[in-house]
Amino acid sequence: MPKFELPATPRNLAIAKFLAKADKSVKISAGTNIIVVSFDYGLNLQRLFIEKVVPDLTDRDWINIRKTVRNSLMGGKISSESELGLSIRPMRTRIIRLRVNPLEEQIIREAAKEAGKSLSDYIRGMVLRGAEEEEMLQKDFEAQMPTESTKRAQLSPQEEKGKAYVS
């Protein structure tokens, strides 16, 4: 579980509580001198969101936060950093085996090369994109399914009473 430490100040405590509220996998433990922020999957620290909690955040404050996170980070890696934010991901990843025939492997390797990604990154991205699309399709399907109340509303008064309806 990646984690980083912040000095125990009211401003940093507000930021840590905001991160925990925004992402359920974030856990904070506050001591007298240090606030430890730990998380399971990854974390994006974006200045725009933190400014909602700390409106008087200065450039120097933001630089100090980034520097403190970078220097105290354990079990994670900063995958991208800019003036507006940084992304942290866990160091440990898991291996999932995938069986494909040689023709499929060649097609996947060529597609990854065209996309300018490593084979692992390309497959991961495609699988995650497919999972997100599947989830959206499932939600759309469930939203379109009639519920009991809509079924009852569509019945005529005679059908509701159980009588045969003849027109």
Image (cartoon, helix red, strand yellow):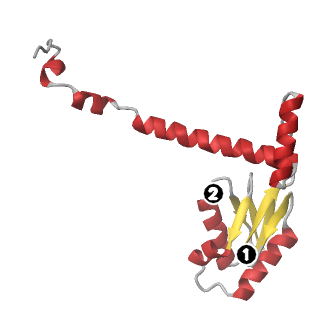
Q: Nearer the viewer, residue 83 or 120?
A: 120
Q: Around disc 1, counting alpha carbons within 10 Å, would you say few (fewer than 14), some (14 to 19), or many (20 or more)?
A: some
When the figure is inspected, residue 64 is found, relative to residue 112, above or below; the finding is below
When the figure is inspected, residue 134 is found, relative to residue 68, above or below; the finding is above
Q: Nearer the viewer, residue 83 or 113?
A: 113
Mark 1 / mark 2, whichever is N-terminal = 1
Q: Position of residue 34 (x, y in %)?
A: 77, 71
When the figure is inspected, residue 115 is found, relative to residue 110, above or below; the finding is below
Which quadrant of the figure has residue 19? bottom right
- Callout 1 amino acid: Ala
> Residue 8 got which mark?
1
Residue placed under numbered mark 2 in the picture: 23
C-alpha distance separating marks 1 and 2: 21 Å
Q: Nearer the viewer, mark 1 or mark 2?
A: 2
Residue at image position (67%, 68%) is: 16
Residue 93 seen in the current view: no
Residue at image position (62%, 44%) is: 132
